[in-house]
Image: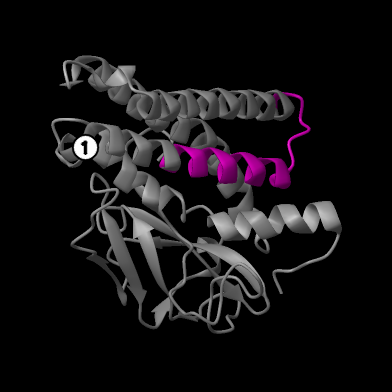
Amino acid sequence: MAAGRAIGSFGLTEPDPRLGSGRDGDARAPRRRGLGPLGHQALDHNGSIADVSVIWAKDGETIRGFLIERGAPGFSAHDIKGKFSLRASITSELVLEDVRVPASAMLPEAGGLGGPFSCLNQARYGIAWGALGAARTCYVTALRYAQERRQFDRPIAGYQLVQQKLVHMLTEITKGQLLAWRLGRLKDAGKMRPEHVSLAKRNNVGVALDIARLARDILGANGIVNEYPVIRHMLNLETVNTYEGTHDMHTLIIGRDITGLDAIR
């Protein structure tokens, strides 16, 4: 996988509504070490084309990662159709029906949710930057369109409400860039905490989605056609706003950190 000769996938999300961010994590049934059944379903990118999937499930009372190779008996992946967002990726439902794996398929150093969360923190750091890239594209597109689109014998960029939207967009992009830059400095210094990442992911994705919606508004009817990139970014950001931790969950993570009181449970 590291050399690019194999494709992997990451199965963490459990559709069972009884489980999730607050308590038990992602696996329904207790597991035992060595050979044992895995009855786990997950929503997973690259699931149907992956050579190996990392599935996070309970081994007794501990969350552990298991390597499940494509073609393992009882393992199947079914692509999810009809997506309006993240359409460039393959999203699959992974179904494991009494799949049995040897102890050698278990990641030996990853115990508890610290393993997957350490990976997610890195991904969320990248999202804090990536969302701003989408926001900047929407802003630049809206600015150029407003300068070229004429209404009542003048560019719409000359009207007060359009300028107000553009100023708001640029201001929030600049603030988000400074936040992400500061987070990167903390990361380089080894001082970045998960709560710092939650703050940046929550803010930057939220403002990027707001900017995409404002850009779509400035473009009017042209904002919903694929001649311009705005609607694509807006739809994708709708998903980014809820994956890698929803806006609300990151709110509670930050709230717990600043108050010392856990509102998640």
Q: Nearer the viewer, residue 237 or 210?
A: 210
The answer to whether any part of residue 151 appears in the image is yes
Q: Identify the element where label 1 is drawn.
A: helix
Locate the N terminus by quadrant. Answer: top left
Locate the C terminus by quadrant. Answer: bottom right
Relative to 33, say whether 159 is above or below. Answer: above
Q: List x then y, in percent, for residue 149.
A: 18, 20
Q: Nearer the viewer, residue 16 or 219?
A: 219
Q: Which residue is mark 1?
A: 220
Quadrant in the rendering for residue 230: top left
Seen at 61% across and 75% down, the residue is 59
Specify few, some or many for label 1: CA neighbours under 10 Å numbering under 14, 14-19, or 20 or more.
few
Q: Is residue 199 magenta?
A: yes
Seen at 43% across and 36% down, the residue is 2
The part of the chain drawn in magenta is 188-209
Q: List x then y, in percent, for residue 174.
A: 55, 22
Which amino acid type is shown beneath numbered disc 1?
Answer: Gly
Does 97 sit left or right of 145 as displayed?
right
Q: List x then y, in percent, for residue 27.
A: 53, 75
Seen at 25% across and 41% down, the residue is 231
